[in-house]
Image (cartoon, helix red, strand yellow):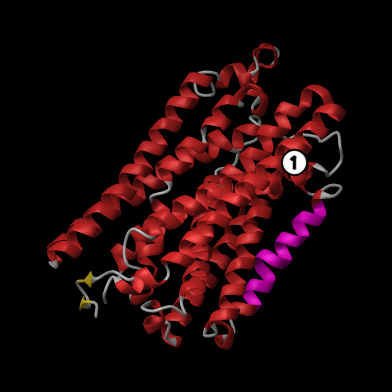
């Protein structure tokens, strides 16, 4: 394969980068405009809603970047053509960790509005929060976040750099290095994402705890990354050289993998619900009560129907898995549902004085941050050919 294949789609890639930046500007304007409306109507609660909506957007795009990093490491450990065709997309998404680290700054600035454990007056009146103080405090919160991002960035950068060197050397000797790093890398991801899920989402309601939530959080990120990678692959799949690899067998493998993670997400979600509901403990039950009362019950039903039931029924069909446009539609639909799920995790943590208008801020925030993230992702994707020039299992790609 020659580099000219990638030159053919450069104008289109640059056009999409411009559209991404334009979307970011529009999203930011809407975010500020509706934030002003909130300020005029809800007084001091506005900063909290600003940061809460931003936290939803941050966790959604974080899920794509880290999910792709996990899938990349899984592919190096397991092999398979499905990972070969996704590799450039996975590598490019995993290198967005630097952008995500910068995107965390507003979350750090909004700690005292987002988290009650960061408010001295609240902590002073709550013995439980005082007991959690050695862990839930602002300096340690920020230090942990820096450690998480450094770990994720190093894993992504090293894997991508080794991949580039392997192509230059045309030698299989580095393949063992990928496996040696990916195994411990997955362990490091599991440890860091466990604490990150507690820090950034669970501690919004510091009296609630769940040993299942960190696993559900990690599973959701992998599903988000996989849905994104498949959607991008199929949107680019008609272009050479990717078109050569868009065989029914490869598409079927990707669809089956997506189905497996949809089922795993459903299993983890139901397991957490069942354990908490059966336990019937006052420290755990309120989390679900807040998310199944009033309008939030509608969101829960939508998640059951469109995040699990419909994708499950569609992905068990061989015809849909082998049809690029239909499989892409399912993947994009799952991405939308992943946003809804993150929204359902975070927003019910607080009451909302203006009813459900706050969702506009959430959508605007995800568009604003997403525009910047997509621009960076496309820039990374344009650095290398869409298909690896060398793979030990296949030799030199023609």
Q: Is residue 338 visible?
A: yes
Element type where label 1 sits in the image: helix
Q: Is residue 164 left or right of residue 187?
A: left
Q: Nearer the viewer, residue 296 or 215?
A: 296
Q: Quadrant of residue 200?
A: top right
Q: Main structural element of the magenta stretch: helix, strand or loop?
A: helix
Where residue 375 appears, as percent x and y from the top left, is 49, 52
Over which residues does the magenta segment extend? Answer: 297-313
Q: Residues within 10 Å of mark 1 (few under 14, many from 20)?
A: some
Residue at position x 45%, y 65% in the image: 11
The residue pinned by badge 1 equals: 348
How many numbered circles are shown? 1
Where residue 392 appears, as percent x and y from the top left, is 19, 72
298 in magenta: yes
Q: Is residue 280 visible?
A: no
Q: Quadrant of residue 32?
A: top right
Query: If the image is split into quadrants, where does the N terminus sit?
Result: bottom left
Residue at position x 16%, y 60% in the image: 174
Residue at position x 73%, y 33% in the image: 49
179 in magenta: no
Q: Is residue 249 left or right of residue 80?
A: right
Compared with 100, 167 (above or below) is below
Residue at position x 70%, y 41% in the image: 29
Where residue 117 appears, as percent x and y from the top left, is 62, 22
Q: Is residue 226 left or right of residue 277?
A: left
Q: Quick one: which residue is furthest to the front in this view?
A: 11
Compared with 88, 274 (above or below) is above
Compared with 237, 175 (above or below) is above
């Amino acid at each position: 394969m020659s580099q000219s294949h990638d030159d053919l789609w450069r104008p289109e890639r640059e056009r999409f980068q411009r559209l991404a930046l334009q979307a970011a500007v529009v999203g930011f304007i809407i975010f500020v405009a509706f934030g002003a409306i909130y300020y005029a109507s809800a007084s001091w609660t506005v900063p909290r809603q600003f940061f809460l909506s931003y936290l939803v957007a941050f966790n959604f795009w974080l899920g794509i970047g880290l999910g792709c990093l996990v899938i990349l490491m899984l592919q190096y450990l397991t092999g398979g053509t499905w990972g070969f065709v996704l590799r450039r997309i996975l590598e490019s998404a995993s290198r967005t960790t630097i952008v995500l680290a910068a995107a965390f700054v507003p979350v750090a600035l909004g700690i005292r509005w987002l988290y009650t454990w960061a408010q001295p007056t609240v902590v002073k009146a709550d013995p439980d929060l005082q007991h959690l103080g050695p862990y839930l405090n602002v300096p340690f919160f920020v230090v942990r976040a820096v450690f998480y991002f450094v770990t994720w960035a190093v894993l992504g950068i090293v894997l991508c750099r080794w991949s580039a060197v392997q192509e230059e050397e045309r030698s299989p000797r580095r393949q063992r290095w990928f496996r040696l790093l990916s195994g411990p890398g997955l362990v490091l991801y599991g440890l860091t994402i466990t604490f990150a899920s507690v820090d950034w989402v669970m501690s919004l309601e510091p009296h609630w705890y769940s040993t299942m939530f960190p696993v559900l959080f990690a599973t959701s990120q992998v599903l988000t990354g996989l849905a994104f990678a498949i959607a991008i692959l199929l949107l680019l799949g008609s272009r050479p050289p990717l078109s050569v690899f868009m065989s029914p067998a490869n598409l079927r493998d990707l669809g089956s993998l997506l189905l497996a993670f949809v089922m795993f997400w459903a299993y983890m979600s139901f397991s957490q619900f069942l354990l908490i509901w059966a336990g019937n403990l006052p420290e755990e039950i309120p989390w679900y009560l807040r998310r199944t009362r009033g309008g939030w019950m509608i969101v829960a039903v939508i998640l059951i129907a469109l995040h699990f039931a419909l994708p499950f029924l569609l992905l068990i069909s061989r015809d849909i898995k082998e049809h690029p446009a239909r499989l892409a539609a399912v993947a994009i639909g799952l991405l939308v549902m992943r946003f809804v799920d993150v929204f359902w995790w975070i927003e019910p943590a607080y009451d909302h004085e203006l009813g459900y208008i706050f969702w506009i801020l959430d959508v605007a925030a995800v568009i604003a941050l997403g525009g910047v993230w997509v621009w960076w992702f496309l820039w990374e994707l344009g650095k290398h050919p869409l298909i690896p020039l060398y793979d030990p299992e296949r030799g030199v790609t023609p």
